[in-house]
Amino acid sequence: MVCQSILIGEADENCCRFACGLVSDLSNYLEKNMSHYAGNFIGGLNMVLRHATMQLETKLHAMIALGDLCLAIEENFRPHLQESMDCLMMAA
């Protein structure tokens, strides 16, 4: 999926922010059905948060997308919770 490639790759930061927005929108639209795709997106969002040279504004977009994804898939986020929390702590 293009959105995942942008999140994981060394894309322009504006493209990365756009991809984070798409993840947020998809999460809000698909809700629990987003569980089928969540693992791939969570990995990409966590990579953005871990990335040392990403601007804080880009990381903020990734945090928002991760939160929307978490709210959408509810208990299905649990397997990703610890890794995501670690990435959130590293993002600052």
Image (cartoon, helix red, strand yellow):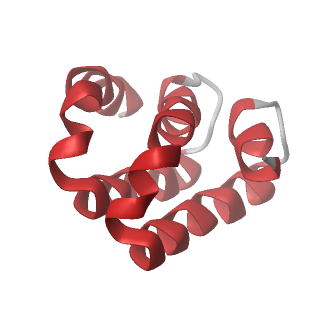
Q: Which residue is depicted at the point 41% across and 61% down?
A: 33
Camera-side residue of 6 and 92: 6
Instruction: Return the x and y of residue 17 as percentages of the image width and height.
Output: 65, 59
Going by the image, does 83 lie left or right of 24? left
The answer to which quarter of the image holds residue 32 is bottom left
Camera-side residue of 61 and 45: 45
Going by the image, does 44 lie left or right of 14? left
| Quadrant of the rendering where the C terminus is positioned | top left
The answer to which quarter of the image holds residue 82 is top left
Q: Which residue is depicted at the point 30% across and 20% down?
A: 83
Q: Which residue is depicted at the point 24% across and 26% down?
A: 79
Asked if residue 20 shows in the view, the reply is yes
Going by the image, does 64 lie left or right of 61? left
40 shown above or below 90: below
Asked if residue 85 shows in the view, the reply is no
Instruction: Return the x and y of residue 50 as percentages of the image width and height.
Output: 50, 23
Q: Which residue is depicted at the point 45% across and 71% down?
A: 30
Instruction: Return the x and y of residue 34 as percentages of the image width and height.
Output: 44, 57
